[in-house]
Image (cartoon, rainbow, N blue to C red):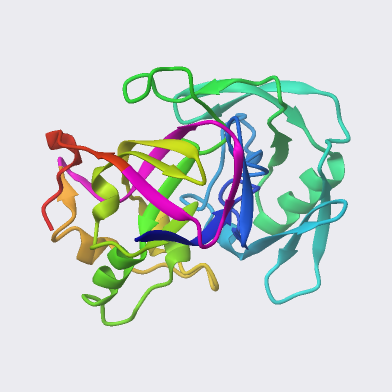
Amino acid sequence: MLKISQIFIYPVKSLGGISLQQAEVMDRGFKYDRRWMLIGDDNRFISQREIAVMALLKVTLADDGLKVTYVNTDNHIIIPFEPLKKDLIEVSVWDDTCTAQLVSDEADNWFTEKLGINCRLVYMPDDTRRHTDPNYTDGSNITSFSDGYPFMLISQASLEELNSRLDEALPINRFRPNMIFTGSVPFEEDILDEFTINYIKFYGVKLCARCIITTIDQSTASKGKEPLKTLSRYRSKNNKIYFGQNAVHSGIGIISVGDELRILSRHTEERFVVSS
């Protein structure tokens, strides 16, 4: 039996994630997941790909908003769930442009100081509808400031298989998934087509191509060569390295650690096959 073993959200894109025992599935993914984002002077998103120290900004949920703390210090800021500003601007996430709301001058100044670059914090309001890639979905699904899809899944077996090939085991936070499941063989997530979790229907739509963020230690922001060096030997296809699968969904509800993942159908298309 496949079961959900871990759940994560990342309220501010590319900052630290939050481990939850249960999460609410809403129209664009888990509640709070990537609803906030930091942008540069060009209004384009910034991430650990350019600013590795973003890994050191850890996020927790507080009663009055998000608490963002610089790791190993008491230096923090509270970001209210509702932005203090009303200004709307157009922002870019990869090839997408969508409307976002500025949060506060205090947040902009705090993040600018901590990251050492000019940046602003924005929020995705409810009436912004950023659609998933129509090349892989039917166009009806929406997402937040994620790289492209509302969910990413990895099996615990895949992580363990990778770690068996490494000199030093890596934690799952290198891969920033939304859900981890147990009870499968390694890389069974690759072929998940249609499946349900607590009666919410999900659809696996695209294998997740991995980037250099996976090589950044999320505790120290130091960079290395793993796991991409090892993954490139057996999880490479068309000059990309794959680990995990992106998914969309229909329906809303609550998902909890321990919920069963029921597979309704499996992919058979060649694009979901990666040598391993």
Is 198 situated above or below 194? Answer: below
Is residue 241 in view? Answer: yes
Q: Is residue 140 magenta?
A: no
Percent across and percent down for residue 62 are: 81, 58
Is residue 226 in view? Answer: no
Q: Residue at x 21, y 37 (%)?
A: 267
Range drawn in magenta: 238-263
The image quadrant where one finds the N terminus is bottom left
Is 204 situated above or below 101? Answer: below
Is 147 situated above or below 126? Answer: below
Quadrant location of residue 182? bottom left
Horizontal relation, residue 230 to residue 189: left or right: left
Residues 157 and 275: in front is 157
Percent across and percent down for residue 54 are: 59, 57
Q: Is residue 259 magenta?
A: yes
Q: Residue at x 14, y 61 (%)?
A: 233
Percent across and percent down for residue 63 are: 86, 55
The image quadrant where one finds the C terminus is bottom left
Q: Main secondary structure of the magenta part?
A: strand
Q: Residue at x 83, y 35 (%)?
A: 83
Residues 162 and 73: in front is 162
Q: Residue at x 66, y 61 (%)?
A: 57
Percent across and percent down for residue 256 are: 57, 56
